[in-house]
Amino acid sequence: MSSIYHGHLTVSIFGQSHAPAIGVTVDGLPAGEEVDLEELQAFLNRRAPGTGSWSTTRKEADRPEILAGLDKGRTCGAPLAAVIRNTNTRSKDYENLRDVPRPGHADYTAQVKYGGFQDVAGGGHFSGRLTAPLCIAGGICKQILARQGIYVGAHIAAVGTIADRAYDPVDLTQEDLLAPGRKPFPVLDDQAGLAMQRAIEVAKGELDSLGGVIQCAVLGLPAGLGDPMLDGMENRIARLVFAIPAVKGVDFGAGFAAAALRGSENNDAFYMDGSQVKTRTNHAGGILGGITNGMPLVFRVAVKPTPSIARPQKSVSLSRGENTILEIHGRHDPCIVPRAVPCVEAAAAIAVYDALLEQQERSRQP
């Protein structure tokens, strides 16, 4: 299922990697919200293919065509629908994958589930290409949130074993939060970024790939968003982040590192900053009991190495029922992480805006 519905927003993504177009519908956006299409295009350009040596050589403009939902540059209350045309496809590179599945990819599970009727070209609807429509929905949500003083940003926390400096989880500034998104390679420490790019080049030269970690944060959130247990903010964000095909893990605040701490170390001490309750540390990542506490919401995302690599790999022939060697052709990212950064921002923005709409609706009820 390629739709998500919560209390207010329904986001549905459609299309395949080599279909004539891919697209998204977003239902539930309030009427009257301005959408800056130039700003949206700039956001989509961060995810677009062919932007650097770390990216696939497939060239796509990724220009969204808004089919419905906008009138004179503002949302009109109708569902917003947008498409992106696919123009630079080479489907012949994928013809053998219905019989010989790629290790680490969804070719085999798609074959089992859809009985051979799935679209294998470019990975079909399992492709990272489908994150472009996600970025349309998330980019619009980011704009609306920013007008309400809520900002979403992310950076490459690591590629392989090379780490960027982390966001300050307590005193994160808007400038630090958004600075990586203004760079061709989205890191805080440019020297670390150069080392990451060199590592990607080495892996590419060895017909291999690299994975990494993305850190995302949201500033300006009020306390009180989200619900306990099944509808906590962690749940809402993680569900959308896992829509990004390469994501294999999400943790919030101290995350797995909290397991090695004592309670006295992990607990975030409260204090009064004027009339506002704050915490001196932020191991909780801005969420307690599934509900935002007013501190920066901070989480990390683990991104696997690109499974489509040029090295010969062991696989099977499904038609012959025997082992075989697969050599993959086509154009693939040697590292997905840089282009996944805006996708993580998009997922977070949708989840946060949906929760904000829910809270605003509750506050209007008598």
Image (tube, rainbow, N blue to C red):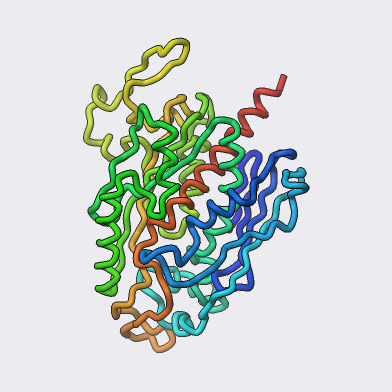
| Image quadrant assignment for residue 361 | top right
Residue 299 percent across, percent down from the top left: 39, 40
Q: Residue at x 26, y 50 (%)?
A: 191
Considering depth in this image, is 151 or 130 the residue closer to the camera?
A: 151
- Camera-nearest residue between 268 and 321: 268
Q: Position of residue 303 (x, y in %)?
A: 36, 55
Asked which quadrant contains residue 81, the reply is bottom right
Q: Residue 292, relative to residue 248: is it above or below? A: above
- Where does residue 217 sit, x and y in percent of width and height? 43, 38
Which residue does the image show at 54% across and 77% down from the upper left? 89
Q: As displayed, is residue 263 above or below residue 105? A: above
Query: What is the tally of numbered marks visible in this picture?
Result: 0
User: What percent of the width, then of the height, locates residue 242?
Assistant: 46, 52
**Residue at x-position 41% and y-position 50%:** 183
Is 78 displayed left or right of 155 in the figure? Answer: right
In this rendering, the answer to whether 59 lies above or below 269 is: below
Residue at the bottom extreme of this rendering: 320
Quadrant in which the N terminus appears: bottom right
Q: Where is the C terminus found, in terms of image quarters? A: top right
Q: Nearer the viewer, residue 111 or 271?
A: 271
The residue at 32%/54% (across/down) is: 212
